[in-house]
Image (cartoon, helix red, strand yellow):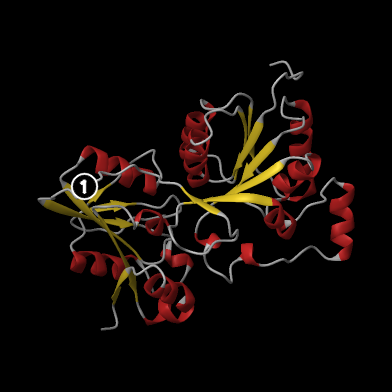
């Protein structure tokens, strides 16, 4: 497309499939604006390309860049930006990953743009997480990043953000001025359900501890009587049990939303040991979220479990009882 534009555009930048889902909603709330898109894929798989292709339909120019580590990867990224139709001034920039050097570079090159932020996930609402820190590189690294074009860091972006779009209602966020967005427009009136299903969201739990192996998980899931198992991409082996395995192109949050649409008379119980994904759909009608933990997990992630119980009022199953 011609880079000599007559009308200003906005730029929206994403890193994860969830961010792309939220970005769709942000664009829908700003239908009078033209958007360009940058996606930095942390891993290249079918889910990433599915959500990129879906979001890309709502944008004009776009870049899909598979993230590479180190300075070589960063140089490859800046080269692609300069060679693309996105190397230009923007009126507005929207982003979630305020810690991304790739996105800090874009903001530094568009210092006059108005900044808007949106949720990345739990990091937005737990006060000791990375987005609440104002840590900058040491003086030597900062000098190197300066030479590479970066002038703005997390604390600068938070100060510049005019408004923050959030999926978490009535919960403090990294930006004081928030606007609630809904991933799913639900029925205004409560729907009577005549059946319920239990869905477990898998995780690579052996990465946390060898004490939480497949036989342990199998025993827990059989006691809960899980109906469906949604596997995590990094799970090397799926536990055995009397449940069906879900094979879907959709990320978990989107899968649950589509399930609710297709099954209007069914309620859903979602279970996980420590995945944050179930938090993002816990507020939906006909969804009940429940966390599972034992003494090891609680001791290791006490602040997380205390937060979801006290602040989000989410139920849990204590395996120690």
Q: Position of residue 92 (x, y in %)?
A: 67, 38
| One can see residue 210 in this view | no
Residue 106 showing in the rendered view: yes
Q: Residue furthest top?
A: 2
User: Residue 47 location in percent, x, y?
Assistant: 46, 39
Q: Residue at x 19, y 42 (%)?
A: 264
Residue 239: % across, % down: 30, 59
Q: How many marks?
A: 1
Identify which residue, 246 or 213, lies in the foreground: 246
Percent across and percent down for residue 8 are: 70, 27
Tell me which residue sits at (77%, 63%) in the image: 136
* Vertical relation: 285 (above or below) 130: above
Would you name the residue on which mark 1 appears? 189
Q: Residue furthest left?
A: 194
Q: Is residue 96 above or below residue 38?
A: below
* Other residues around mark 1 within 10 Å, as few (<14) / some (14–19) / many (≥20): few
Name the foreground residue: 186 vs 217.
Answer: 186
Q: Secondary structure at mark 1?
A: loop
Whether residue 274 is situated above or below residue 107 in the rendered picture: below
Placement of 79 over or under 116, stated as above or below: above
Give residue 214's quadrant in the image.
bottom left
Nearest to the observer: residue 221 or residue 254: 254
């Amino acid at each position: 497309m011609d880079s000599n534009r007559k009308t200003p555009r906005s730029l929206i930048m994403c890193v994860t499939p969830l961010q792309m889902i939220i970005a769709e909603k942000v664009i829908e709330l700003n239908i009078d604006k033209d958007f360009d898109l940058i996606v930095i894929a942390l891993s290249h798989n079918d889910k990433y390309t599915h959500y990129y292709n879906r979001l890309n339909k709502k944008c004009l120019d776009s870049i899909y860049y598979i993230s590479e580590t180190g300075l070589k990867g960063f140089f490859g990224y800046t080269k692609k930006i300069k060679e693309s139709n996105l190397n230009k001034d923007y009126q507005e920039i929207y982003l979630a990953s305020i810690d991304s050097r790739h996105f800090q570079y874009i903001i530094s090159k568009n210092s006059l743009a108005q900044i808007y932020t949106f949720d990345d996930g739990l990091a937005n609402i737990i006060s000791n997480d990375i987005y609440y820190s104002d840590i900058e590189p040491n003086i030597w690294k900062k000098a190197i990043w300066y030479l590479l074009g970066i002038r703005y860091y997390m604390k600068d972006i938070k100060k510049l953000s005019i408004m923050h779009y959030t999926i978490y209602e009535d919960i403090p966020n990294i930006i004081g001025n928030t606007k609630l967005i809904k991933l799913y427009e639900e029925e205004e009136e409560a729907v009577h359900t005549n059946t319920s299903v239990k869905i477990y969201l898998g995780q690579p739990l052996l990465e946390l501890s060898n004490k939480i192996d497949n036989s342990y998980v199998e025993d827990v899931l059989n006691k809960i009587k899980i109906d469906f198992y949604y596997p995590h991409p990094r799970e090397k082996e799926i536990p055995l049990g009397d449940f069906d395995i879900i094979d879907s192109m959709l990320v978990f949050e989107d899968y649950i939303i589509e399930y609710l649409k297709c099954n209007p008379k069914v309620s859903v119980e979602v279970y996980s040991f420590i995945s944050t994904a179930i938090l993002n759909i816990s507020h939906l009608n006909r969804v009940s979220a429940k966390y599972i933990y034992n003494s090891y997990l609680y001791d290791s992630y006490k602040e997380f479990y205390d937060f979801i119980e006290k602040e989000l009022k989410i139920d849990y199953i204590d395996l120690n009882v």
